[in-house]
Image: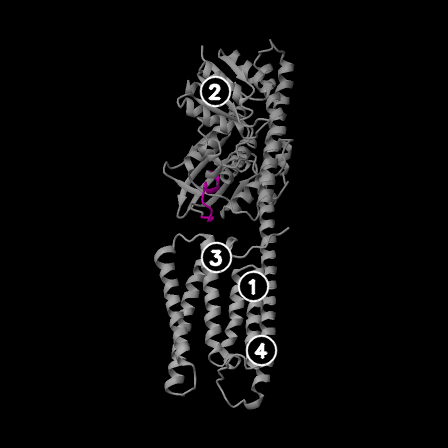
Amino acid sequence: MVQELSPIESSAFKSLKKVIIWFITLRWIACIGVSMVLILSYFIFHFQLQYKILSITTFILILLNLTYSFYFYRYKKQYLQRREIHQFFQIQIFGDYLLLLVLVYFSGFMENPLIYFFVFHIIITSFLFSSRIVTLYTAILVLVIGSISFLQYFYIIPSYPLFTSYGIMAPIVRLVQTAGFSALLVITAYLTTSTIKKIDTRGKQFEIELNKYKSLDKIKSNFILQVTHELRGPLAAISGFHEMILRGITGEIQDQTRQIITKADRRTDNLLIIIGEMIDFAYIKSSDDITFATKELSVRKIISENISNITTKAEQEEVHLSVACPKHLRIKTNSDLINIILGNLLFNAIKYTQPGGNVSLIASEKGHEVHIVVEDTGIGVCEDEIEKVFDEFYRSRRAREMEKDGTGLGLSIVKKAVDALHGRIIVHSKEGKGSSFHVFLPAYIDTGQIPGGENAENTDNR
Amino acid sequence: MQRILIIDDDEDIIETVGSLLKFEGYDVDFAITTEKGIEKLEENIPDLVLLDIMFPDKKTKGFDAAAIIKDLYADLPLFVFTAINREYAFDFSMDDIKADEFINKPVKLDRLLELIKKYT
């Protein structure tokens, strides 16, 4: 069941302090207005009014508002508790009801247009309190106004008319007016509380949806961990067993066995890469609308990490690796995405370069961008295929000939990662000569997300 | 002889990495839970620790253990051994993990030896 909460009890609490300031200001305006009207009608229009009582009421209003202001600004501006704010509003609204009633009663009652200010009161009350309290206020108000009207009708209590010209019709007209006015109050209370209830329900639904969305993200990363654990774990073990045999731990091995185990190991490595690509692909695909957390990183450090991950492969393939990066080059970006970009480009470059070839990675600063070039002397891509290299699952003819295993996802992941970082990627290639991939990334991305903001919380739980 | 402690829930990983390291002349000890691993570590401090991240009871338990180990022995070389090196899979930044090296599983022996030599 959805619990009914007024703003004072719910999350709208913060803005309530503003409402208090607003209340006090409006009340000052009311004080000035009423005083002006009294002065004008006494000195200029010469109305017959209960000036004594009205002046005292106005004076009380001024005193009350002074007290409110003093209480709020001097003592409690910073430290008001929920309960205190609640009580503060109750007192203010009750006081306003009472004073307005007195003012209106002694200045024509139903004839006085000021009586319509009760409508505003009800609207404000329904914004602040639960519908039960609004109903209570409205019922009391209708009861009091109705009683006064009836008592005046039967001349039990005196009336203070503004205009004497109503003549004999006056009492009955006033009763009808009272009935109409009561209806107005009840309808206002009903409309505002039901509208506010609807808005609240919507808000709560929205909150529930948002939480679902957040937990979905959590489920997704747990799923990635699970898949990795279940798939990469066994493959890592298989790869280790291969190496045990190849190293001769199990005893001398024949050439043919060595060849077979080497092939098996190669396919295992490929499978590991493919799983990695699929996980990256799933992540990037599902993160289309998500802002990525960024942090400031040393480009040199990112590059050296990626290079060290790939060194063994480069040695196996007998490809020469060279790197150049200015020492102080820094970039504010998402670390996963930049690792995906560099890892894939380097991996591809080595994979499609024949033994004895070269792969180089050069990083430099170009204005507000970091420019990274990965160049190889590999098989290259022919002209009519170059546009398609970033397509999902696309593999060029030469690539398929050279290596059976491959998802054709690597470059499409790179492209998506570059896009997500608001960068550009350009490829130059000549079949049989080699390829170069130029990546331009903004040196500073501010996603508005505080790096480590949410993270810091989690590391505390370690 | 230098001693390496492997903490991993996968006994096949312990067998493969362990026997490869033994073959290369290291003394190898192992534990299949982080609790046992820390116990062993306190009994007899090794020269280097190889620590897995994902354990059956908690997927990021290795990170918790890394923090404990580094709190106890700040100078002890600690390699985190992980099948995934993406932050998106975890709830926190890899920078917060106090490990000397992150090693992607599987690792080729030559690469592992190179790193071990760097720290011992």
Report the magenta residues as a range. A446-455
Tell me whether circle 1 and circle 2 mark residues in contact (CB < 8 Å): no
Q: Tell which tag, 3 or 2, sits nearer the viewer.
A: 3
Residue shown at 51%/65% (left/top)? A124
Q: Check disc 2 and give the amino acid type.
A: Val
Magenta: main secondary structure equals loop
Look at the picture and state if B77 lies above or below B84.
above
Secondary structure at numbered mark 3: helix
Q: Check disc 4 and give the amino acid type.
A: Phe
Q: Which residue is mark 4?
A: A150
Can residue A335 be seen here? yes
Q: Earlier in the sequence, mark 4 or mark 3?
A: 3
The image shows residue A109 at horizontal and vertical percentages of 51, 79
Distance from the alpha carbon under mark 4 to that under mark 3: 34 Å
Q: Check disc 3 and give the amino acid type.
A: His
Chain under callout 3: A
Q: Which residue is mark 1?
A: A134
The image shows residue A224 at horizontal and vertical percentages of 60, 35
Chain under callout 4: A
Q: Tell which tag, 4 or 3, sits nearer the viewer.
A: 4
Chain under callout 1: A
Distance from the alpha carbon under mark 3 to that under mark 2: 59 Å
The label shown at residue A86 is 3
Distance from the alpha carbon under mark 1 to that under mark 4: 24 Å
Q: Which residue is mark 2?
A: B49
Callouts 3 and 1 in the same chain: yes
